Each structure stands twice: as structure tokens, then as C-alpha cells.
Amino acid sequence: MWTGTVEEQRKHAVELVEEGLSISMAADVAGVSRQCLHKWLKRYRTEGLEGLADRSRAPKAHANAVSEKMVRRVLRARRKYREGPRKIRHYLQTRWPNEQIPAASTIGIILKEHGYVEPRRRRARAAPTPTELTSAEASNDVWRIDFKGEFEVGRALCYPFTITDGFSRFALGVRAQTGTGYEPTRANLWRIFGSYGLPRVIRCDNGNPFVATRAPAGLTRFGALLVKLGIRLERTEPGKPYQNGSHERFHKTLKAATARPPASTWNAQQKRFDRFRKHYNEVRPHEALDMRAPAALYSASPRPRPKSPPPIEHPGVQRVITVYDDGSVSLFGSHIHLSTSIARETVGVTEVEDDIYKITYGPIYLGHISFRHRQPVTCFAR
């Protein structure tokens, strides 16, 4: 709980942001909302410290300054047209052009006071994406992975797990899976690593098992495995499949060649995938490759797959702590939940300001924890 004056609170929160702390974390430390802190920052950057002084809280317009007659007109227009404040104001101006019509904001207050406005439901935050996606300039710079939409094979659903090289379009793997769970996906990916080595980057969408939108930094067991192997996981933006465009086109070709109609048995379907992959890589000309086949350009990675995933490293951190089986950590006597995705793993802890600590998993920033309050305040990356 903040114990200083309001002006000191504003100044301290603004200073934290100016020193590089995130908006979310600075707002948590100051005990205010992010929207409030954004308002203070705007005042500070345009007016300096004077902009953080107290201001009159008197509203510029009062809903109760509107006549009862006009209020009744507003409510009638709302019931008749079922529109929002701006359109209602337009209807009133059209009907009574010579009268003073309330501003749309005042009409909104009237509607809210009379129960015509329901509070908005907050949407779940989508996973963030890198501001710039890696350009594939050579084989194994970027691998693209995904699941082709499921279809029935016999009496079971088949989820083809697909991997292509972003530079050469080489199809590294097409494996029939019974689901999108971590274990079968990891097993298939591990075999492909054994055949072709390790890439620099793997690009995926925000689905299971690649990303968990509610976990810190979206980290899953799949993502944690890649971190240990020194592979950067790169996520496309939700609703923008063109960011993985060549892989999407690969899926269309795959579906047309192997799933229309699908095979009658699981083994037969996998054989179709294998035949398709060989033809696609070695025979089929590709227009984006000057009519060459992908195998003419692809070469295996010089980084071989290790016998087993190495332990995670935390260079430059002040201390290393272990994540419990339930996904929590113990820090200064407090239990704080991180994620079960990294249960039994270790994370790095570094104090970045008095009683504020940065939590990392190798190179991955997970968030900050503040101990300036009676209870720890967490701010995790998304």
C-alpha cells in the first residue's frame, strides 16, 4: 500500500518507467492501474513535473445539467433505435435542430445512469508476437512447424505434424499423430533433430503444444525444450497466417495429395505422407526456387542433436532457484506460482531495484516480482 503523498506516488511511478521498468510493473509498484499511469506519463512528458500536480476533479459536463425533458428524449431515442450515444445525438439534432443537444459523452452518462449500458467484458489477452520475424537466408535459419487440420483415418482423427525449412522449402517431416499433445510432438521433433540437426529458429502459431497464452512469456514444455537446445521459438501473430505463408501453402499441397480422400488405415496414411515428402523434396519443381526441387538447396544443420537435452543455463543472474512440481517458487518466504511448464526446472532471479526482482528462464524474460507491498506483486510477460 502506498504511504506517501499522491504527488510523490505519481513522480515515483513516472521515474520507474523512465528508468526502464515496464508500465505494468511500475503501475503495480505504485498501486494504480496502467491506464492511470499512462495518463500521468502523458502529463509529465508534455508539462514536466507540474503536470503531476493535483487538478480539479470537477467534470466538464454534468448529466444532471440536462433538462428532464431532454433526458426523456434521449431515453426514448435509445428504446426506439437501440443505438449508441453518437447516433442518438444525431437523431436528436435532426429532430430538434434549433435546440442545444447534449454531447455524446453526456448522453452516454445518461444511458449508463438509467441502466442502458452494460459493462464491457474484458477479452483474454492474445499472445504477443515478435515485432520482426527472422528472415531465412540459409538452410536451418528458420524451421516452420504446425499441425495440418485434422481429418478421419479409419475411426480415428489424424493430426499431421509438419515441419519445413523456411529457406529451401524442404519438408523435414510429416508425421501422423492422434493429437497435438506434447509427448508425441516432442518424440517426432526429436527424431527429426536426429536426422537434420538443430535450426536457429522455429516459427509456430500460438496453439498447443507450442504456446500457452496464460503462462509467463507463453512458455510451454515444448518451448522450454527449445531454450535448452539453444533454439529460439518465434510466434506468428494470431489471425495472420501469411506470416507463415510458405508453410500454409505446403499444407494445401499436402492435403490435396494425401487426404482427398484419406487412406483407410493409419499405416497406409503414413506411407502416403512418406511418398509425398520424397516426391515434394526431390522431384516436384518449386516456382519460388526457380523450378528447382527443395533437396537441391537444402543441407543439414552443422549443429547436431545432443544425446539428451542439456540443463538450462542462467548466465549473469544473481541467484538460481528451483521450480516446484506445482509450478511455484519460494522467494523470501513467499510461494509464487510461475508455470507447471517449467516444473523441476530452475529460473534465474536478479534484483533490478530495491525489492523488485526479474525472473528469467535462460534468455527468456518471464516477469518481475515486487516485494514492496505486504503481499508480493507479480507482473508476468505475455
Image (tube, rainbow, N blue to C red):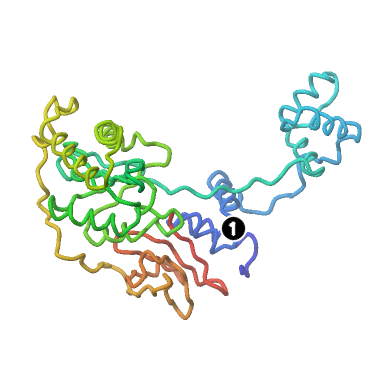
Which quadrant does the C terminus fall into? bottom left
The residue pinned by badge 1 equals: 10
Query: Type of residue at label 1?
Result: Arg
- Image spot of residue 154 (x, y percent): 33, 45
In the image, 174 versus 103, the foreground residue is 174
Q: Residue at x 79, y 44 (%)?
A: 115
In the image, 360 versus 353, the foreground residue is 360
Q: Is residue 117 visible?
A: yes
Instruction: Answer with left or right where residue 72 lies relative to residue 221.
Output: right
Q: Residue at x 10, y 35 (%)?
A: 282
Which quadrant does the N terminus fall into? bottom right
Q: Residue at x 33, y 51 (%)?
A: 178
Query: Tag 1: Cα neighbours inside 10 Å, few (<14), some, or many (≥20)?
Result: many
- Image spot of residue 273 (x, y percent): 21, 41
Instruction: Answer with left or right where residue 101 lies relative to residue 215.
Output: right
SS state under label 1: helix
- Image spot of residue 308 (x, y percent): 18, 66
- Image spot of residue 120 (x, y percent): 65, 45
| Above or below: residue 28 compared with residue 326 | above
Q: Is residue 143 visible?
A: no
Q: Residue at x 83, y 19 (%)?
A: 95
- In the picture as drawn, the residue positioned furthest to the bottom comes out as 333
Identify the image quadrant of residue 6: bottom right
In the image, 247 versus 359, the foreground residue is 247
| Above or below: residue 95 compared with residue 244 | above
